[in-house]
Image: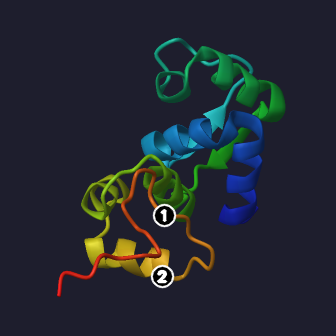
Amino acid sequence: MNEGHLTIQLQAILGVEGCVRFCQALGGTRVYVSHRFSDDHAAVEAVGRDLADKLSRAWAPATIRVPLARRERALFYRQQGLSDAKIALLLGITENGVGKLFKREADLPDRPGSAKSGAQLNLF
């Protein structure tokens, strides 16, 4: 299963925020999805018991390669109003990389609370 397809499935099971938290904590690793995660399992710590149980019901027993889901995480973090610098730190890439990632998005929404406006004051 490719990374994009797996990310979509994780979003369907965990929701967007749960998927972001899961991929932030475990992205790039292989995780065995058991019928019941232990309380100290990284998946439970990342998304909580309820969502970890949902993941178990959907996929146990299986081993998955948790996607990095950088695009989805970046878009989520931007929607939360984080700066490109903070997003870069969370994704483990450069600020330029974040800028390039956002340039590829056709209908990128403005950050919440951004002061962008169609009418700009003329100071001269």
Considering the image in quadrants, where does the C terminus appear?
bottom left
- Residue 39 rendering spot, x and y as whole percentages: 52, 11
Would residue 28 be visible to someone looking at this image?
A: no
The residue that appears at 39% across and 50% down in the rendered structure is: 81
Residue found farthest to the right: 58
Residue 103's disc is 2
Q: Is residue 93 above or below residue 66?
A: below
Q: Amino acid at mark 2?
A: Lys
Quarter of the figure with residue 96? bottom left
Mark toward the start of the polypeptide (1 vs 2):
2
Q: Nearer the viewer, residue 71 or 26?
A: 71
Considering the image in quadrants, where does the N terminus appear?
bottom right
Residue 102's disc is none
- Residue 79 rendering spot, x and y as whole percentages: 49, 52
Q: Tell me how far mark 1 sits from mark 2, CA to CA.
A: 13 Å
Q: Nearer the viewer, residue 27 or 16?
A: 16
Q: Amino acid at mark 1?
A: Asp
Numbered marks: total: 2
The residue that appears at 74% across and 20% down in the rendered structure is: 35
**Disc 1, disc 2: CB below 8 Å?**
no
On screen, residue 76 versus residue 53, left or right, reads: left
> Mark 1, residues whose alpha carbon is within 10 Å: few (<14), some, or many (≥20)?
few
The residue that appears at 48% across and 82% down in the rendered structure is: 103
The residue that appears at 27% across and 54% down in the rendered structure is: 86
- Residue 45 rendering spot, x and y as whole percentages: 47, 23
Secondary structure of residue under mark 1:
loop
Residue 110's disc is 1
Q: Nearer the viewer, residue 51 or 86?
A: 86
Residue found farthest to the bottom: 124
